[in-house]
Amino acid sequence: MVQATAAVAREAGADFVLEPVDVDEPRADEVLVRIVASGICHTDVAIRNQDVKLPLPQVLGHEGSGIVEAVGSAVNHVSVGDHVVLSGDSCGHCRHCHEGLPTYCDDFVERNLSGARLDGSSPLKQNGVELLGRFNGQSSFATYSLAASRSVIRIDKDLPLELMGPLGCGLTTGLGTVVNAMKPPAGSSIVVFGVGTVGLAAIMGARLAGCAQIIAVDPKPARLAMAEELGATHCIDAAKEDVVARVVEITKRGADFSVECSGVPVAVRQAVDCLGRPGWAAQVGATPGGIEIPFSMDHMGFGRGIKGVVLGDAAPQTFVPYLATLYRDGRLPFDRFVKYYDFADINQAVHDSAITGEVIKPILLMES
Ligand SMILES: [Zn+2]
Ligand SMILES: [Zn+2]
């Protein structure tokens, strides 16, 4: 058993509280990781606030990076001392896992969103009482994670480990949606709604794919400026402009692709309405629970559609190292929109990113 400090989400909307926890010894298919850093993703805050209703209290966090301290008897893809990034868990043997789409694993929800192992137990305890600690296979808002083995991805030791955590969710989601799910032909047009971490990653993906028109849509001018720096060819201020009219004006015939990263219902509708013939919209942002959004079926009839995409349709074990290579080559400069915080300042980091929006990607440093 290892003693750790974890940021516990106890009540809806309340601050995270740093508390001591006991971490189990690894089972056969588990890896003990000393967490060096963890990104904060919008989903963590949405669960803490219960906009997304997963059980509390729980240790959240799903963009962890760290160093392997111990491995279970059945783990052979990582060793003690390896530098690793943590991503979502999957079973590895259902149909979709075999076909390279582990984010649609039969057990995806149970493994990643229950907060527990498949048998219902948790790797974390306080005074002998279990505390949910298996979020997205990892629960990285802690100084140690007992992660599911398929969540643990080895990366090269020359990479800045403290920066790499967001490769496991935000960067994979945005870039993967474009290059894995949409595969836009060179010269095509794409619109990205909401340019936080996921949207900016989609813009960098569109640039890699050779899209000729890359249109960023957001109500925050500072975020549009970052989108332009990273490859957007056009920016639309959603607070001031008629978004659909502007996209049609820029593309002449409507966009070939759109990626909706905000989850705001008005933007979801615009992401479909701005499409040309044919065209499709990827829904990536989490919409409010239970919501229904009407679409014009006259518009849909001409080869247009919308489809949800989870974690960029990526197989994290190969996609995360690919993203690390892009970073090293200077083609994924996401460090430009990262701000580091001490773990103890987690609530300040949430405030600066989720509430004021002045920080795009906060990363918590566990050891400083
Ligand atoms: Zn995330
Ligand atoms: Zn599976």
Image (cartoon, rainbow, N blue to C red):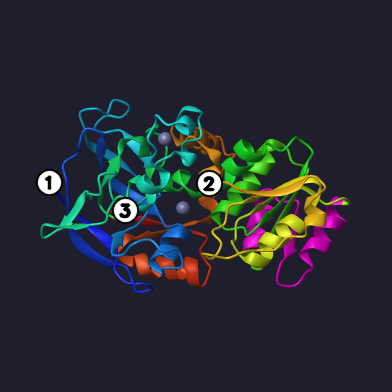
> Going by the picture, which residue comes out furthest to the top?
76
* Residue at 41% across, 48% down: 109
The residues colored magenta run: 223-251
Relative to residue 283, is residue 137 drawn left or right?
A: left
Q: How many other residues sit within 10 Å of disc 2, few (<14), some (14-19) or many (≥20)?
A: many
Q: Which residue is mark 2?
A: 310
- Mark 1 C-beta to ligand 1 under 8 Å: no
Q: Which residue is mark 3?
A: 115
Please name which of the two marks, 3 or 1, marks the residue nearer to the observer.
3
* Residue at 72% across, 47% down: 280
275, 367: nearer the viewer: 275
Q: Is residue 356 above or below residue 318?
A: below
Q: Which residue is mark 1?
A: 1
**Mark 3 to mark 1: distance in Å?**
19 Å
Q: Is residue 239 magenta?
A: yes
Q: How many other residues sit within 10 Å of disc 3, few (<14), some (14-19) or many (≥20)?
A: many
Q: Secondary structure at mark 1?
A: loop
Amino acid type at mark 1: Met
Residue 145 position within the rendered picture, expressed as x and y whole percent measured from the top left: 27, 47
Relative to residue 86, is residue 2 drawn left or right?
A: left
**Mark 2 to mark 3: distance in Å?**
18 Å
Q: Is residue 68 above or below residue 253?
A: above
